Each structure stands twice: as structure tokens, then as C-alpha cells.
């Protein structure tokens, strides 16, 4: 088995889906860039061509290399993020890029793969129990470190992606209350922005009363319920302060528009409104390739990057959008299937990290474009314009494909 060619062992299904997504992504970038008379489609084609030697290198490197040097790769990634504060180039108010001639490189796109490797390394190196509080914080520290370096750039979109690692930790034994606490916190935060705090506290009180009477813990549950009620009340009462004093104005505007508290179709809500018009105008089968009136008219800003899915919706319609969504779903399910059949914990954890990152980008981007999530600058994998994003996602995926191929050689 060890002498078998690696090309016979790699998962060609994943590669074919990847290639289809990249090709479809370029076609949409081509369509959206014609209206602005920019050469983004030519640059993206160059980025795509350059992924070929990148893929060859990733597959040529021995799979054990990624496990052995995961910590070093992670440290280098953190240093690249730190370097942005001193040598980074500021674009649109964000100091997220290194300027290299006429091109820019965004290290946060590569940090996702590095963090995935570091987390997989930590969870597989030691016989850890994620029910141990010290182990939990050590694992969470790996996730939090890059987030603390990305947020000040400021790049909340990239930082948000790291939240999915909590689900990976849950898969490996992290207590479920971490996940539930996260979901409940987000729910309470949004609900408090919609309703008055006293109503949210009342709802929370009623829920705790119901839980208490259905619980079998007796008197002990009264103490726990009381503590939870106090913590929840304090959190709810602090939401307005956090929203008004910590969130920046454009973040507040986006939340207010999303929640229907503000209507600003010519200002902060322009992008989302135009993207909804473009997607809705596509109907069932779309207007045809290069025939999108919203796309041709350049009505949707950033259509070749964060809002690239609007081109799919307008020109290919519901049917074309469904095909793209099906391709992403197929890739995600394939990665999860491959992760579950891995022979090492390192490969399995990394596989779940890959699936989680791709899913979060996919879900948040489309939710943002159709107006059910605030605009925070999250690109659609393999579709959105940009060399850093394409290369970062390619490295992320093909490292796992290499690991999966290696498992055959480990018999």
C-alpha cells in the first residue's frame, strides 16, 4: 500500500466539486466585472492558475508534515497578523493586507488553516478530557489568540468565522452547555434589541419557572434557577449600553436595518436592498448569463466580492442558485464523511475544522446577501474575488485531502 501513487488515493469527488465551484465563481466574477469595466476577472483567472502549483505543493508535502509542524505554522500565522499593525496596508479603513507590488495579501485568510492545524494538534497530542476546565481554556486560547489580533484591524467578519471552532470542540467532548450558552446569549442580545429589556426579563423568568417545575432536581434547582435569572437579567440590562457604546455606528446601523428599526435604502441599507432586488428579479430560471440588468447597471456595490451571489440569483435564477447551494452542501457533506473515516484524531479534528469554516462562510455570506444577517464582509468560498481568499480556502481544503489520501498509506 505504501508504494501506491498518491494520485490514486486522493478523493477526486472533493476535487471535482472544488473545481466546479471555482469555475462557476470565475464566470460570475467575469459577468459582474464587465459592468464596471474592471479587469478583476483577468486577475482572478491569474489567481486560479496560480492555485495549480499551490495544490501540487500541498499534495506533494508529506501528510505528517502538517501534524509535526502545526504549532510552528500557527506561530508564524500569529506573527503575520501582528505584523499588520506595523507594516499592513489600510484599505477602506481596514489594516488587513500586506502590499506586494500591485497585489495585496490578507494573512487572516491563511490563519484559518493554521488555527485548524493547531487545534487539531492540541486535541490529538495529549490524552485530554475537554470536561477538564484547564483543558477547555487551553483549547479556547488557541481559538481566541487570532481573534484578538483580527478584531482590531478591524475585521469582525473574519473574527466571526472562528466561533465555529466551538462546535468542533463540542464534537470532541466539550460540555454542551458552552454551545447552548452561546446560542442563548446571541438570542437574548437580539431579542433585547427588538423588545424592551423588562419584557425580555419577564420571558426569561417564565421559561426558568417552566424548567424548574419540569426538573427533578428539587430544591437544588431553585438555587441554580435563581443564579441563572440574576445573570440573565444583568446581561439583558447591559445590552443597550454595549450596543450604544461598544458597537461602532455602522454596526448599529446594520443591526437596526436588519431588525426593521431603520429604513435607509439610499444609505447603509443600499447594498442589501439592491442585492435583494437583483436576486428577486432572477425568478425561477434567471435572465441568462451576462443578461442581468442589475449586474450590468452596476447597482450592487462590491458585487464581485461579498455580494457575488447576487449575480448567481439574477442571471441563473432560483434553479441556478439551488445548483450552487447543492454543490456547497455536497462538498461539506463529503468532508464530514471523510473526517469520520479518518484513522487519526488529528485528521478527524482538522476535517471538522475545514467543514466548519467553509459552512460558516457559505451560510453567513448568503444570509447577508438575502438580508437576514448584517453586512460584515464575509466572502463566499471559491466565488468571491480575491487571491488571498481563494488560496486560503484552497490550502485549507487540500491539506485535508492530502491527510485523507495518506490514511490509505497507513494500513
Image (cartoon, rainbow, N blue to C red):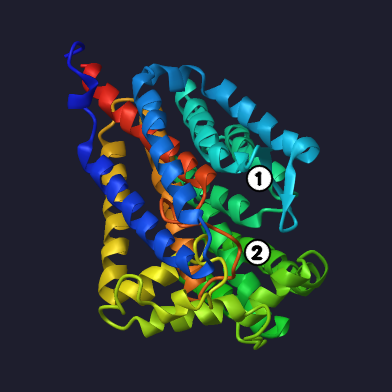
Q: Quadrant of residue 194?
A: bottom right
Earlier sequence position, callout 2 versus callout 1 = 1
Picture coordinates of residue 222, whole percent (x, y):
62, 66
* On screen, residue 359 above or below 204: above
Picture coordinates of residue 294, whole percent (x, y):
46, 79
* On screen, residue 13 above or below 79: below
What's the distance in space between the residues labelled 2 and 1, CA to CA?
Answer: 28 Å
Residue identifier under label 2: 228
Picture coordinates of residue 407, whole percent (x, y):
26, 23
Q: Residues within 10 Å of mark 2 (few under 14, many from 20)?
A: some
User: Relative to 326, is 47 on the left or the right?
Assistant: right
Which element type, helix, strand or loop, lies under badge 1? helix
Viewer-closest of 333 and 226? 333
Q: Quadrant of residue 157?
A: bottom right
User: Relative to 389, is 343 on the left or the right?
Assistant: left
> Is there any visible trace of residue 171 in the rendered image?
no
Q: Residues within 10 Å of mark 1 (few under 14, many from 20)?
A: many
> Is there any visible trace of residue 55 in the rendered image?
yes
Residue identifier under label 1: 147
All told, the count of numbered labels is: 2
- Work out which quarter of the rendered image holds the C terminus and state it: top left
Q: Residue at x 32, y 63 (%)?
A: 325
Q: Quadrant of residue 241?
A: bottom right
Between disc 2 and disc 1, the foreground one is 1
Viewer-closest of 48 and 401? 48
Amino acid at each position: 500500500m505504501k508504494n501506491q501513487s498518491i494520485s490514486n488515493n486522493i478523493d477526486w469527488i472533493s476535487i471535482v466539486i472544488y473545481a466546479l465551484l471555482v469555475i462557476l465563481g470565475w464566470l460570475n466574477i467575469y459577468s459582474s466585472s464587465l459592468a464596471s469595466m474592471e479587469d478583476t476577472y483577468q486577475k482572478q483567472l491569474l489567481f486560479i492558475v496560480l492555485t495549480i502549483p499551490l495544490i501540487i505543493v500541498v499534495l506533494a508535502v508529506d501528510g505528517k508534515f502538517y501534524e509535526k509542524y502545526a504549532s510552528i505554522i500557527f506561530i508564524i500565522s500569529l506573527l503575520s497578523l501582528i505584523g499588520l499593525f506595523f507594516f499592513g496596508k489600510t484599505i477602506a479603513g481596514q489594516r488587513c493586507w500586506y502590499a506586494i507590488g500591485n497585489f495585496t495579501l490578507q494573512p487572516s485568510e491563511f490563519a484559518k488553516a493554521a488555527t485548524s492545524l493547531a487545534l487539531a494538534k492540541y486535541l490529538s497530542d495529549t490524552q485530554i478530557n475537554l470536561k477538564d476546565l484547564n483543558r477547555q481554556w487551553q483549547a479556547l486560547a488557541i481559538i481566541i489568540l487570532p481573534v484578538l489580533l483580527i478584531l482590531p484591524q478591524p475585521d469582525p467578519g473574519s473574527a466571526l468565522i472562528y466561533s465555529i471552532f466551538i462546535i468542533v470542540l463540542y464534537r470532541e467532548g466539550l460540555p454542551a452547555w458552552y454551545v447552548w450558552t452561546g446560542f442563548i446569549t446571541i438570542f437574548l442580545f437580539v431579542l433585547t434589541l427588538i423588545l424592551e429589556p423588562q419584557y425580555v426579563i419577564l420571558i426569561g423568568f417564565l421559561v426558568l419557572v417552566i424548567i424548574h417545575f419540569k426538573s427533578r432536581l428539587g430544591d437544588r434547582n431553585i438555587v441554580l434557577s435563581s443564579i441563572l435569572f440574576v445573570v440573565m437579567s444583568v446581561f439583558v440590562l447591559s445590552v443597550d449600553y454595549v450596543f450604544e457604546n461598544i458597537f461602532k455606528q455602522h454596526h448599529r446601523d446594520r443591526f437596526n436595518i436588519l431588525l426593521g428599526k431603520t429604513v435607509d435604502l439610499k444609505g447603509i441599507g443600499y447594498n442589501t436592498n439592491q442585492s435583494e432586488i437583483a436576486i428577486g428579479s432572477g425568478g425561477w430560471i434567471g435572465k441568462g448569463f451576462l443578461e442581468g440588468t442589475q449586474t450590468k447597471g452596476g447597482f450592487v456595490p462590491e458585487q464581485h466580492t461579498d455580494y457575488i451571489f447576487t449575480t448567481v440569483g439574477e442571471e441563473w435564477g432560483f434553479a441556478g442558485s439551488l445548483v450552487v447551494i447543492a454543490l456547497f452542501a455536497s462538498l461539506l457533506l463529503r468532508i464530514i464523511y471523510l473526517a469520520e473515516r479518518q484513522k487519526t484524531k488529528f485528521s478527524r479534528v482538522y476535517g471538522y475544522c475545514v467543514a466548519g469554516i467553509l459552512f460558516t462562510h457559505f451560510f453567513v455570506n448568503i444570509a447577508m446577501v438575502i438580508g437576514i444577517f448584517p453586512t460584515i464582509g464575509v466572502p463566499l468560498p471559491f466565488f468571491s474575488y480575491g487571491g488571498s481568499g481563494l488560496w486560503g480556502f484552497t490550502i485549507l481544503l487540500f491539506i485535508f485531502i492530502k491527510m485523507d489520501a495518506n490514511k490509505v498509506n497507513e494500513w
